[in-house]
Image (spheres, rainbow, N blue to C red):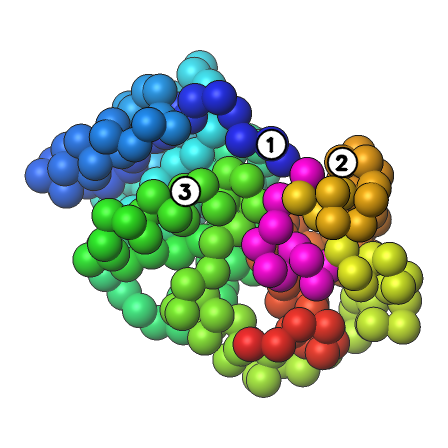
Amino acid sequence: MSQPNKLNILVTDDHTLFRRGTMMLLESFEEVAEVDDAENGKEALEKLSTENFHLILLDLEMPVMDGWETAKKIVSKHPDVKIIMISMHDSLQIISDLIEIGVHSYLLKNAEPDEVHKAILSVVNNDFYYNHLVSKALHKKVQKDGIDRGVARRADVSPREIEILQLICQELTMKEIGEKLYLSEQTVHTHRKNLMKKTKAKNAVGLVKFAFQNGIAGF
């Protein structure tokens, strides 16, 4: 996905001070056009149904509707909206479970502003951002589950698809992958779509997990 000229972001958190501070931070990023906020998941879903947002920063624990339930509804009803979950919890099990339902990345609330900026750009451009927590969560998930027998194995993926998957794991954009492999961006998108169908991945994080499981990319 090519990055939009300017991003519209929704901050959803029940703590007013954190929410407003995060909004001020996001407004300082030159790539951001509009920042809006919601106090809980129900309010966030109402805004997503009437306004155009590229990305949501979503608190895990909130009253009325928590981040977990909200994320599942966003994935189902607004699949083009990217989700970065934010929380003080560093449980690897929680992180891997959120990734399984389609969340694009996970940040702790004490993350540095530079990491928040990097995560937003990576999720918009590459469909995922994995920091050390996400990487550890994926690693633990792979070790626990092994290869998912319900999806493709490495032998089912073509050499070209493996090339593209390796570059996705390096956080290259579709355009950058096309330039590196002398392919059109549309061709790369087609290969990525086929990979997601074979692996049953909901987004690029799922593709990265498959790559780890099958030795296509390392940790």
Q: Which amino acid does label 3 sit on?
A: Ile
CA–CA distance in space, label 2 to label 1: 10 Å
Secondary structure under tag 2 reads: helix
Upstream in the sequence, badge 3 or badge 1? 1
Residue furthest to the left in view is 17
**Visible residue check, residue 187:** yes
Residue 44's image quarter? top left
Contact? badges 2 and 1 (CB < 8 Å) = yes
CA–CA distance in space, label 3 to label 1: 13 Å
Residue 174 left/right relative to 33: right
Residue 139 belongs to magenta span? no
Q: Residue at x 32, y 52 (%)?
A: 115
Front residue of 52/211: it is: 211
Q: Mark 1 points at which residue?
A: 2
Residue 28 left/right relative to 173: left
Magenta stretch: dominant SS? helix
Residue furthest to the top in view is 50
Residue 181 left/right relative to 56: right
Q: Which amino acid does label 2 sit on?
A: Glu
Q: Where 78 falls versus 96 (above or below)?
A: above
